Amino acid sequence: MIKYVVRELRLNLKRFTEFMPEPTVSIILPAYNASEYLQRAIDSLLDQTYTDFELLIIDDGSSDSTWEIISSNRDPRISGHRFQKNQGLISALNYGLGQAKGEFIARMDSDDIALPTKLEKQISFLEKNIEYCACGTSIINFDGKVSSYMRYPKTHEEIVSNLFLFERNICHPTVVIRSKVIHENNIKYRSEYLHAEDYTLWIDLAKFGKLYNLEEGLLKYNRHDAQVSSKHYDAQIQTSRKIVKELLLENFRESLSENDISTHLDFLIHPLNKSSKAVAEKDIRNWKDKLLQSNRTHEVFDEKCFNNTVTYKYFHSCFYYRFPLKHRLGSLISLIRNDPKFGLQTLWLLVKRLLFYRVFNKAS
């Protein structure tokens, strides 16, 4: 008798759900041993002004109380999924893509906080601009003590230039993607690019539509030592070097020597908190000029956006490698002369970042 009742209930529930409309947005939230922050992240999504979504929370084999937190939330929009063993972030993300039913797919990390209007503003943009396949936002960095605003490039032209030149492009947990582009082109997170899987996702998406970032910071990005970008930083850098090299070989039309490739990687990738190796300023400057000339010849990227980012990377290299003062000042002048508004904005952001780190170090 009991088995019969249970079977009937399951059949009726299945019939009921078949007539329910699909949610407009599917939010993918992977969680691994995330009990410290997870409920805060869930609450920030349940407080969204845009309410037509499903929240797919994937517990990737946690050993703490992550699953209990997921199970305790009774909102019908929440769907909990549990891996018995830890399979890694890429597996959890791809599983989420396979489960997503919405017209749009949003990402969220278990330790971040979405501001209330985040989804509403991103969905509004994508509905009005059908040529765009993904929309991110700027972010607000915080660590519980100090917060700072971090602007991301806005236009598609800026974003793809920055992708090629390994500069800030899209913040993964902010993004909302048109699911049609994902499913029709079989786009997934690629396991061969562990700890930099989002980098290749933007490259793949840019082949089928435009990318955009809302200028407003709509996500509080929690910076702490336990996050992936901190725990696996060295591996992330190595994977990034691999991707940057592949992009160079794919987009640079001139013949390349091993020294060219090595200089390109030195020019673009400046690891944090590492002793900078000896690099000649002349090699970096010549490579900068070669990149600019190649793009003028072949018109691969928007010239203004590309010039801005290349000039900024030279400016950054001059300080990272501790080139003589005349080169540092010269790179700053070139940055401002190339595009006064962009140069002064960059200078102001760097000053604010320097002040932020000084305050952070004092607070620590």
Image (tube, rainbow, N blue to C red):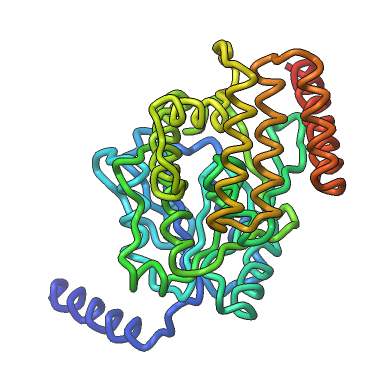
The residue closer to the viewer here, 350 or 38, is 350
Q: In the rendered view, tell whether residue 91 sits above or below residue 129.
A: above
Q: How many marks?
A: 0
Query: Which residue is found at the position 72% from the left and 30% from the top?
Result: 315
- Left or right, 76 with respect to 112, comes to left
Residue 323 shows up from this direction: yes
Quadrant of image for the C terminus = top right
Query: Which residue is found at the position 43% from the left and 45% from the top?
Result: 247
Query: Which residue is found at the position 60% from the left and 16% from the top?
Result: 280
The residue closer to the viewer here, 247 or 299, is 299
The residue closer to the viewer here, 335 or 84, is 335
Quadrant of image for the N terminus = bottom left
Q: In the rendered view, tell whether residue 230 sits above or below residue 135.
A: above
Residue 62 picture location, percent across and down: 35, 38
- Left or right, 4 with respect to 47, comes to left
Residue 82 picture location, percent across and down: 31, 50
Query: Which residue is found at the position 20% from the left and 81% from the top?
Result: 8
Residue 313 picture location, percent across and down: 65, 34
